Image: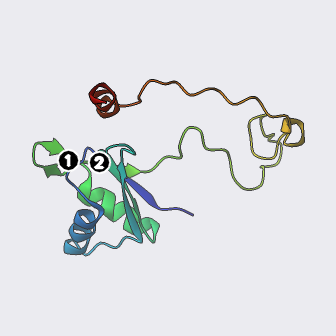
Amino acid sequence: MSFTVFLGNLPVWVTADDIKQWLTAEDLVADSVKVIRNHETQESKGFAFVEAPTGDEMQAIIRRFDRAPLEDKILRANPAQPSKGAAPRGPVPAGAQRTAGSVGAGAAARTERRPAKKREAEPKSAFATELAKAL
């Protein structure tokens, strides 16, 4: 079972090491800390996931950091929710059925490949747009 805490509303300068130091200062334990970053700029998106070893530790982290002030922000901490696109894992409960988009459903029927879409020539970021203008 996963005991993951969503830690949100972080200033962009916060790193995983900062969060680990805060946890250590509060005698809290985390197995891992991951600050989510923009793939292009590597700037923090303002949230992180903290993996706690137990449910009690997860609740202690949430109690300590939820609504805690940091600079001009109020942090948010709560149990992480699975991503909306995540497929269900494990065995299917009795009486339940997987949907067509679920793992294992109709895999044999999906052997036909669609042609690849052509990528747009337009740059994807403001930085890339400015770079393209300069070239």
Is 24 positioned to the left or the right of 125 in the image?
Answer: left
Up the image or down, 42 lies above or below 34; here it is: above
Image location of residue 22, percent across then percent down: 21, 67
Which image quadrant is residue 18 in?
Answer: bottom left
Above or below: residue 6 compared with residue 125: below
Q: Is residue 7 visible?
A: no
Q: Residue at x 34, y 73 (%)?
A: 29
Quickly name the residue at label 1. Answer: 11
Of marks 1 and 2, which one's residue comes earlier in the chain? Answer: 1
Mark 1 surroundings within 10 Å by alpha-carbon count, few (fewer than 14), some (14 through 19), many (20 or more): some
**Tag shown at residue 44:** 2
Q: Quadrant location of the N terminus?
A: bottom right
Residue type (three-letter) at the residue carrying disc 1? Pro
Residues 51 and 112: in front is 112
Residue type for callout 2: Ser
Report the quarter where the C terminus lies. top left
Q: Residue furthest left?
A: 71
Pointer 2 local density, CA inside 10 Å: few below 14, some 14–19, many at least 20: some
Residue furthest front as drawn: 135
